[in-house]
Amino acid sequence: MNSPLFWITPVASLTALLFAWIFFRQMMRSGEGTETMRTIAQHVRTGAMAYLRQQYKIVAIFFALIFLVLAFLAYGLQLQNSWVPVAFITSGFFSGLAGFFGMKTATFASARVAEAARGSLDAGLKLAFRSGAVMGLVVVGLALLDISVWFLVLNHWINPGNPQEKLTIITTTMLTFGMGASLQALFARVGGGIFTKAADVGADLVGKVEASIPEDDPRNAATIADNVGDNVGDVAGMGADLYESYYVSILAAAALGAAAHVTSDPDIQFKAVIAPMVIAALGTLFSILGAFVVRTRPGAGQGELMKSLGRAVNLSSLLIVISAFLLLFWLDIPNYLGIWGSIVTGLLTGTVIGKSTEYYTSHEFKPTRGISASGKTGPATVIIAGMGVGFHSVVIPVLAIAIGTTFAYCFAAGNWNFDTATISDGLYGIGIAAVGMLSTLGLTLATDAYGPIADNAGGNAEMSDLGPDVRARTDALDAVGNTTAATGKGFAIGSAALTALALLASYIAQLKIGLISFLEKSGSYVFPNGASIDNIEAAREISLIRFMEYYQVTLINPKVLIGILIGSMMAFFFCGLTMNAVGRAAQKMVEEVRRQFREIEGILTGKAEPDYARCVEISTKGAQREMMLPSMAAVIVPVIVGLIFGVPGIFGLLVGALSSGFVLAIFMANSGGAWDNAKKYVEEGHFGGKGGDTHKATVIGDTVGDPFKDTSGPSLNILIKLMSMVSIVTAGVTVAFHIF
Amino acid sequence: MNSPLFWITPVASLTALLFAWIFFRQMMRSGEGTETMRTIAQHVRTGAMAYLRQQYKIVAIFFALIFLVLAFLAYGLQLQNSWVPVAFITSGFFSGLAGFFGMKTATFASARVAEAARGSLDAGLKLAFRSGAVMGLVVVGLALLDISVWFLVLNHWINPGNPQEKLTIITTTMLTFGMGASLQALFARVGGGIFTKAADVGADLVGKVEASIPEDDPRNAATIADNVGDNVGDVAGMGADLYESYYVSILAAAALGAAAHVTSDPDIQFKAVIAPMVIAALGTLFSILGAFVVRTRPGAGQGELMKSLGRAVNLSSLLIVISAFLLLFWLDIPNYLGIWGSIVTGLLTGTVIGKSTEYYTSHEFKPTRGISASGKTGPATVIIAGMGVGFHSVVIPVLAIAIGTTFAYCFAAGNWNFDTATISDGLYGIGIAAVGMLSTLGLTLATDAYGPIADNAGGNAEMSDLGPDVRARTDALDAVGNTTAATGKGFAIGSAALTALALLASYIAQLKIGLISFLEKSGSYVFPNGASIDNIEAAREISLIRFMEYYQVTLINPKVLIGILIGSMMAFFFCGLTMNAVGRAAQKMVEEVRRQFREIEGILTGKAEPDYARCVEISTKGAQREMMLPSMAAVIVPVIVGLIFGVPGIFGLLVGALSSGFVLAIFMANSGGAWDNAKKYVEEGHFGGKGGDTHKATVIGDTVGDPFKDTSGPSLNILIKLMSMVSIVTAGVTVAFHIF
């Protein structure tokens, strides 16, 4: 340890976990309200936990299988680093744990937030936000804990002959750990997304099919499943998702830092490696600070709520900008000013994407209002207009990433002509820009998780007949949640793109390690371009650019082009699988609710309680069954493409999946968000208001948008990174064996 | 001319045009039916011609502007071949002419087909098919004429010092002519697509909004516009589209042939260049033969109609397989067996994509029936299910292209390990596979154009009250058209992908020409990787692979990655523009029809005729205005990306647009087709039949699908190629100047 600054990371991690615990205790001490409120909350909690148990059981089997494969690769064939199999489990475990704690908190919080809102809006806001903050802090705390501990362990155990290599080996090893987090995140997002939208769509459809029952009515057996869905999808799913984004972006930046500064002295290399960790740690501390800024005066309106959250986010972002400068200055990394520029670029890029998301999905602005207006001519025009908005909405985020990448690269490279001599520095800039973008995740995630908590509080208030004024307050809380969630999604998606770009460079680093271990065993290696090598030292010296030339990863190589097409296809195929999964599971839900109406007497008159648990079970089973195929495809396709088309095919695959998946994810998330808010705009009294024909048309748009924005869209971010991770972990295999 | 076989091309061209003229005369001699039938046909004809006049006026302005720019580049800056400005105009002119003749024929044919169907189904089929064949033969005839004449002209005029270069210069020059065809095609597809779907969607919506009026009712002022739309979109638009596909694929293959065999003697090079032309010519002759095979016995059903068309297509495909072998054997090109394998691979790939399209969009099969079934729970599930089917449907075509590319490449390269020493041969294989796929275009296009003719005949029969038995016959004709159209789309989209891949290699050839002309002026050139060159002979010798290395077109170069993201974005943005265009224009149509109901007395009672011309005008104006932005974007974006990010950026852009655009195009075409047929399946009496709730839900799906399958989806094919063409034409500029 040659810089005491590293210790900020474990300290920040423990501080975050401590405050998460404090906020959790505070929340638990708050009153849970009436008997009915408690019962409803209990129903939701039981359902959510039942789901999570089931989910983790299946994930455990999957992890065990992959562990065996990795162990065979590592200990049997020696094609894999020996730390990977174990660490793969720990990162998966921590990611799952973050989701579990977040969901536990959310399910305990909903009735309490409703109860607090009976007192005052301010009390409701504070409690909801603090509960969300538990999730945010647990996610960043556990991620930083995992990183700190493994870094210390590996730093102690890995001591290669050549000290220059030490950090390269440590960071590339740690990067492969990300596969566990990615896989857990994919399961959580896909499974949770299918669960929540099957229940949501199913419940909505029943309302329409059995015309007498309104939405959210306790006589509808799917209502509890719908509320459970908010927790397993929007809380646990999102928690695991962002755990992965955060964790992988830090590890990728660290690995790029080691690669970029390998030629300089080990001290500088060490600083470049810890810089992303410490910046994330500082961001975590500022997030805690920001959490205390969120409050409103008694009687404040929605606008003030927004301002309060905005103030907290702005404050912590500003602090990160300043402290990152001081940190880099203090560390005295070469070109620290440029690297600082990259970090600021990352933050700005995330902000632009967030603002763009808000513009296209909030009904404050023209696009969403246009969708509402198109409802005058029926549901078909609502769908067409929504798709049009979604397609348009990809332009700004792509340009933001294009410009952001250019700046982050050139700042860190220290020149403005993409000079390839400084490519390693430039790529480090891209990696650390992603870390900058996510540095205040503790806070943005708090505002994200706040949304479903407020939503559930509203549901609880509705079902417990707390009266219109309480409902109005929870609605105000909920509305704020929608906008902050949009911004949060912008950061998640933007960082996914930057991280995926950075992972391409990390993949090359892994290939080189695979190549070296191949040389150690076989003595010589022939590249696809015909060049051969038999010297390990020479292999170490191969530059990134030269490596790509040896493997002919150029855009005229058919293997690369085929890979790109397949990658592009994967994004669409994945969406098809998840969309159909929601459709099928929702259909089953409708049938079950109808069956209960038929077979259980007295439901409609309110004399008998419907069998809520059965609906939760149906969503659970549907989600579990349907999440298998997409998740397995994400793991297996990179392996197959690697075995057939080798390194060029894999590069193509990853870039194809990244380019199509990124754009498709924005399209789906924004169409879905815009449809949702177009409906809300009508419900606020425009174009005939609730119950009119325009409203009915926009409700159909909203239902279509549900799987868009909460199942298929967000899963794509993880798909992209998981495919990169699988490729990175199996790089040794790809080097050693491929057909073409 | 060192092979008499070349002359097959002009002969086939003139034969095709002769038979087109014969079929046209035959059709014109047939009776046009009653007074009412003639009047309706006249309305449609006038509207269609008014549209086309307007369209060509705007296109002419656009062409004039681009001509000026090209002329400045060619004669002012000498950054462009001096033939390009003139030839750009001719290819655009011929492409427009093909659409014009096709549409003229179709608008004359509709009433005549209805009249013939009054006699017998066989008579109706024969007339409709022969009228479609006029279009098919005009397209291939004009394309081959353009190619033959220019080839002869350039062969006479271009005589460089080094005879080895002659064919390289001729073919790369001719390839740039494709930009005119691509631009004309984009305007025709986008403008026609917006026109037809604005009218279609508008007419449908009025039917729903003014509940008393059924679809296709003559009291609906938009009906004529709807029928006009079938002609300008599905006939003229498709004609220009496939003219471009056919023309560009032949030119690309010829250019790759010249490049692949440049090191061998000029005689072999000549043979490789004319092979794709002659194969296309042979396919044309077999298409004419096939056209005579289409007939049914009196009283035959729909199944027999299908068989009859299928027989014709199979026969001409079989003949092409045999004759291509004989031709290549006769020409005695090195590895003729491998090249023949590439051609057969192309045909098979097209067939697989066509069959896959049929599977996903015909209601004979599970996916589309599943969409119909999901209509039981309302329109939202219809949309979700349709999107799911569309997303799934990309898998087979992408795998078909992946496998087809591998085989076409390896067959022609003569080895199975993607050996880069033979990359030029392999790429020639990909190019000629696309030609093989499109060789029988004359016939497949006849079956494509047959669809809207039968559709219009049905509309005419309906509006003229010809009675249910005639309508039943035209419906049978129409239904067959739907399935054959699906297969045709498969070929169009598959060939677009292969051609776009081939164009990447052609782009390199153009860059090299740009580089040489730069060297001639400036003496030396520095590549992005730092290498510099000052020797024209050395520049000529640079291999494809080395060229990519000099320009660092690898997947780790941020300029390439940014280009790919922007390319991906372009596909989505383009869809957004076209979707919104349809939505807006349809809205205007609805308002106009409503206004007419309000202001013109007696429309609803049938006493007054609505102002059909006004609706045609609205669709025309909407289409003209809305087609500007997407078309300009397609032309300007490659230029801008080239100016900023240079060659690596352009490569990224083209590959990103290809990979995302190809997959997105399949998704949109197949979702749209599946929704259409899911509605038809319900109309055949399933799930409650016409008028039931399920039917209403599927009608909404169909309306959403309209712009998917007829506006946005098919335009993407052209977008991809137009962007390649613009890049190819401006290659000289990109070599000479870029910021990064």
Image (cartoon, coloured by chain):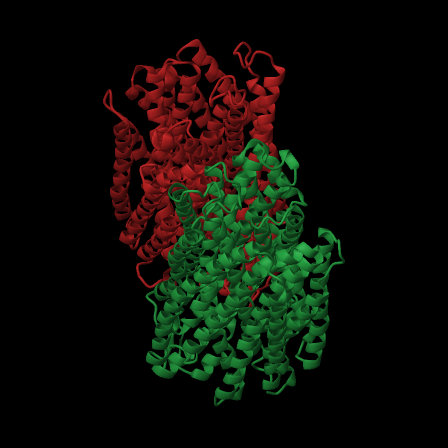
Chain colours: A green, B red
- Image spot of residue A452 (x, y percent): 57, 56
- Based on the displayed image, in which of its 4 quarters is residue B520 positioned? bottom right
Is B548 on the left-hand or right-hand side of A489? left
- Based on the displayed image, in which of its 4 quarters is residue B32 positioned? top left
- Based on the displayed image, in which of its 4 quarters is residue A489 positioned? bottom right
Which one is nearer the viewer's eye here, A287 or A104? A104
Q: Residue at x 75, y 56 (%)?
A: A298
- Quadrant where the C terminus of chain B sits is bottom right
Which one is nearer the viewer's eye here, B97 or A327? A327
Say if A331 sits above or below B605 in the image: below
- Image spot of residue B733 (x, y percent): 60, 53
Point out the residue furthest to the bottom here: A161
Q: Is residue B447 visible?
A: yes
- Quadrant where the N terminus of chain B sits is top left
Say if B339 sits above or below B592 in the image: below
Say if A301 sits above or below B683 in the image: below
Q: Is residue A433 visible?
A: no
Point out the residue furthest to the left here: B297
Q: Residue at x 31, y 23 (%)?
A: B126
- Image spot of residue B343 (x, y percent): 32, 47
Which one is nearer the viewer's eye here, A85 or B324? A85
- Image spot of residue A240 (x, y percent): 51, 65
How many numbered callouts?
Answer: 0
